[in-house]
Amino acid sequence: MPIPFETIAAQLAGVGYIPDRGLAAAVWLMQTLSRPLLLEGEAGVGKTEVGRALARTRDAKLIRLQCYEGLDQSAALYEWNYQRQLLAIKAREGADAQAVEEHVFSEKYLLERPLLAAIRQERPPVLLIDEIDRADEEFEAFLLELLADFQVTIPELGTIVATTIPLVVLTSNGTRELSDALRRRCLYHYVDFPDIDREARIILSHLPRIDVALATQIAQMVGLLRKEDLRKKPGVAETLDWAATLAGLDLRHLRDEPELVHETLACVIKTAEDRSRLTREVSSRLLGMVA
Amino acid sequence: MSAAPKSDPGRAAREKLGGFARVLRQNGFAIGLGETRDGLKILAGPCGERRASLRPALRALFCGRQSDWRKFDEIFDAYWSGRGMKKAVVASGAGRPAGSRPRGGRSGAPQGAAGQAEAAEGEAAAPGRGERRGATSRETLAQQDFRHLTEPDQLAAAHALAAQLARSMRARLTRRMRARRAGPKLDLRRTIHKSIAHGGAPIELVFRKRRDKPPRLVVLLDVSGSMNLYAALFLRFIHGVLTHFREADGYVFHTRLVPVSDVLRERDPRRAVERLTLISAGVGGGTRIGASLADFNRWHARRVIHARTCVMIVSDGYDTGAPELLAAEMASLRRRCRRIAWLNPMIGWRDYAPEAAGMRAALPYVDLFAPAHNLASLEALEPYLARI
């Protein structure tokens, strides 16, 4: 029998996301055990992209909830359409108050927000809860409850039970310590920066026309840059930007144009402090290590 | 594995996995029954056939944080390779309160002191009154320099006082937070609901109150040789701060920085200190304040510091590193947090002037430079902290 997560890995690769083995296993498990998947890792390693790719492999709808400080239920779960409610109340002035109330608090006036939308789909969607660490602890507790029973109680309307259970992917950047309860509930995968081979494959899958040798050199160079003492390590998106720039310049080997490489490093290095640390000497030393 | 009876392979697998879960728990993994159950499903499924596929599957299931993730492979190999299966596998640097409590035998002796400390805490927990009573009734003790506290019961009393101080600080801070809760934002959902009774006219307005983040206190304690006399007491103080503040974090540093919050959250101070001795190798050596601060800024500040954070550095400022580094890191820390308070036990000494190069480099970035040689000086900080 083929190992199930090799199929998953192939599917993900098919939509342009090259996973490592552990991630494929985690994705397979979240489908078999129906647990949410918590992804942690440094900024720029492609955590959000996992959710997107997963939705594409299953041809499912991607519902994304971006968390922020002060995110509450009315922005995440549901809200009533107040303007229309007020209009409706005015239009029915003099009518039986009970009937008006029932009308105004009906499905018609309910605004779905991502979490409610995610449990009311025809087909199971992928629910991406991005940067959960930015939301408050209270919201995290509420989310935990939702992820446990997949039902929502709206006081005016009653309980809404999920028609389908979404695949839930949570990402965290570690700006706040998440609760143990949430961690226990979720499968966990720590997303590391890709190794050179995987990063080269990522470049190739996004820029199919780039030279294979050049892609490997770029991956090596970025790998070396990440080992330098930088405040912001370059992420995968930065690598792709840089690769796109260099590919457009019709370059054969990185070492042929050290000056150009140094100039275009701006794609990869994003803070002034790091920029000043990466002098010409440093960049040519790194270039010397690229095979 | 070879010894498993062929008649009931499921049972052998269950036991093996149960044992693995136990080992992981001993290493500080938070694993519940649900996880073990799901682990069995994995073992019974197509992944269970090969170890190469079992490893990533179990790792995704059993890990909950990055530190687990790093330890997992080592433990997995040690356990499933069959070697050392029977004895507990404990990865290096592991140990959380839940699993490991091997030093029970020693707890008998100092019971009396523990009871006393608890009683003092219980007394002070009564809200609103007598928050400072402990401090004033023990005036003489409060005035005494920590250097001269040697009697064990004096020390115990000082510890209780430190804990109580942390508590009273918190009381101030939270009270202030509540008073600030008022915002002009209308809660439409509730307002509309109320308006139905008035035929749709929003007569009763409902407001939303703004929620402030509770202030957070981060304590960085110098435990190098020159701070020897004060370190133990301030550790107790950090312990009090961590137990009683809603949001707090503690670190100690000498030549490097060690986060101690996890260890000190241990409710029992004595056990906390025991666990601390395990991680504090190097205490009493030289100091590299600048490098330790750099560590903090680099790895911890993003998570720990927000706009209402007060960073409290307890150190005598004798730095063996370059003062330029210290100044740069202080500047970077200053940009991030609300206040920096530097507590220096030496200020309490007669004829002290901040002459140490490190101390002078750091001073421009410090909001409050205060003595911390006795409990009274700590208590004097309370109004300052309340204003954060």
Image (spheres, coloured by chain):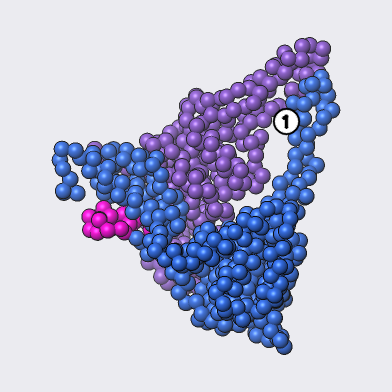
Give left or right: position of A246 versus B136. left
Q: Identify the residue shown where x is 62% and y is 56%.
A: B122
Taking depth in this image into account, of B351 and A237 the one nearest to the observer is B351
Main SS, magenta region, reads: helix
Q: Give the range drawn in magenta.
A: B67-89
Amino acid type, mark 1 = Arg
Residue A76 point in image, percent of width and height: 62, 36
Taking depth in this image into account, of B284 and A42 the one nearest to the observer is B284
Residue B388 point in image, percent of width and height: 73, 61
The blue chain is B
Magenta span has B354?
no
Q: Tell me the shade of chain A.
A: purple
Residue B115 point in image, percent of width and height: 54, 61
Q: Identify the residue shown where x is 76% and y is 18%.
A: A88
Q: Name the residue under label 1.
A: B189
Taking depth in this image into account, of B261 and A125 the one nearest to the observer is B261
Residue B322 point in image, percent of width and height: 59, 82
Element carrying mark 1 = helix
Q: Seen from this angle, which residue lies furthest front?
A: B112
